[in-house]
Amino acid sequence: MKHLIDPMDLTVEEIDQLIELAGKIIENPDKYREVCKYKKLATLFFEPSTRTRLSFEAAMLDLGGNVLGFSSADSSSASKGESVADTARVIAGYADIIAMRHPKEGAPFVASQYVDIPVINAGDGGHNHPTQTLTDLLTIRQEKGRLNNLTIGFCGDLKFGRTVHSLIKALSRYEGIQYILISPEELQIPEYLKKEVFEKKGIPFRQVEKMEDVMSELDIIYMTRVQRERFFNEADYIRLKDSYILDLDKLKSAKEDLSILHPLPRVNEISVKVDDDPRACYFKQAKYGKFIRMALIMTMLGVSADED
Ligand code: CP
């Protein structure tokens, strides 16, 4: 596993191994406290982040390594016109592994072509977010005990939501997943995903506009925010931003063991009153993000604890 740019860079076996290692780290974190001693992670974030950047940094620190980096394009020499390729080549001389977020689709891939250290895509535009996908898969495995035979509703901005795109791709390799895509017509998943994932693999999916119509069927609801930063005009964002608000009333028809996931940040698409419902998993999900990134960093750097 040289670089992680797209969730499909990982085989199902590699995903299983990462989830298994993350589970071992959750059980016994002390065993992994020094496995990355003297190693450095560079977090190159050209776009805002709370969870991804800080969980990557916490992951490396909890493995005994060090972190360096920047949290916005403005505080790097990108603001002076430096290219992604030049930035990556320079940082490869300072660090052992790079996690990069960029508003332009494909930027982490470009970086990976110029360096001989692993590059992890920490989110590129509206394209992919493979480490969020690993976080989501770990959460589903922990909550449901399996990654197959599940009915999953993806709700909200399915057009620009890169976490949805990556998770749909990754789940397409597991058996028995029923996909229900809940969005306004303008925010449906991109055509390329319909063609390259669902149609190519012969996987059925349903598209609906109202979450109430399908709530009772779902094992998992994956909520997303409307991605303001990817809209071309503010008027469209304002018209669509409140399309879905999950509240306790809408949950009345849901299964008792429904799992509510959200990659976060949340704006208003899940009422805060839902936070105390035992079906709400999104803060746990954010916590799992650190453990799966610990497993990923270890695997990509080729380090292990005794007996792993
Ligand atoms: N889920 C996620 O990517 O969150 P951040 O944008 O805060 O990193």
Image (cartoon, rainbow, N blue to C red):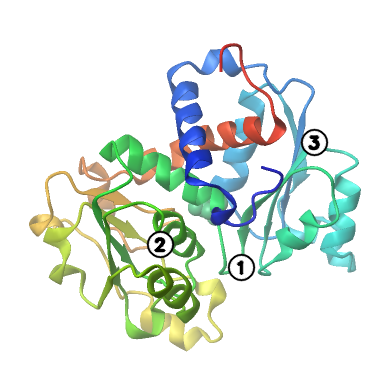
Q: For the residues marked 1 and 2, what is the alpha-carbon distance in whole angstroms?
A: 19 Å
Amino acid type of the residue that numbered disc 1 sits on in the rendered structure:
Gly
Q: Mark 1 points at which residue?
A: 125
Q: Which of 258 and 76 is in front in this view?
A: 258
| In the displayed structure image, the side of residue 97 where residue 207 appears, left or right | left
Disc with the residue nearer the chain's start (2 vs 3): 3
The percent coordinates of residue 33 (x first, y second) are 62, 17
Q: Which of marks 1 and 3 is nearer the N terminus?
A: 3
Q: Position of residue 99 (x, y in %)?
A: 69, 47
Instruction: Indicate left or right for 204 with 46 as reference.
Output: left
Going 88% across and 39% down the picture, which residue do you hit? 94
Q: Name the residue under label 3.
A: 96
Name the residue furthest left: 253
Residue under the point 49% across and 59% down: 166
Q: Mark 2 points at which residue?
A: 267
Q: Mark 1 and 3 residues: CB-CB less than 8 Å, in contact? A: no
Residue 123 drawn above or below residue 80: above
* Residue 211 location, quadrant: bottom left
Task: Tell which tag, 2 or 3, sits nearer the viewer.
Answer: 3
* Mark toward the viewer: 1 or 2: 1
Q: Which amino acid does label 3 sit on?
A: Asp
| Label 2 to label 3: alpha-carbon separation | 35 Å
- At 91% from the left and 49% from the top, the residue drawn is 90
Secondary element under disc 3, as helix, strand or loop, is loop
Q: Quadrant of the C terminus?
A: top right
Q: What residue type is labelled 2?
A: Val
| Tag 1 secondary structure | loop
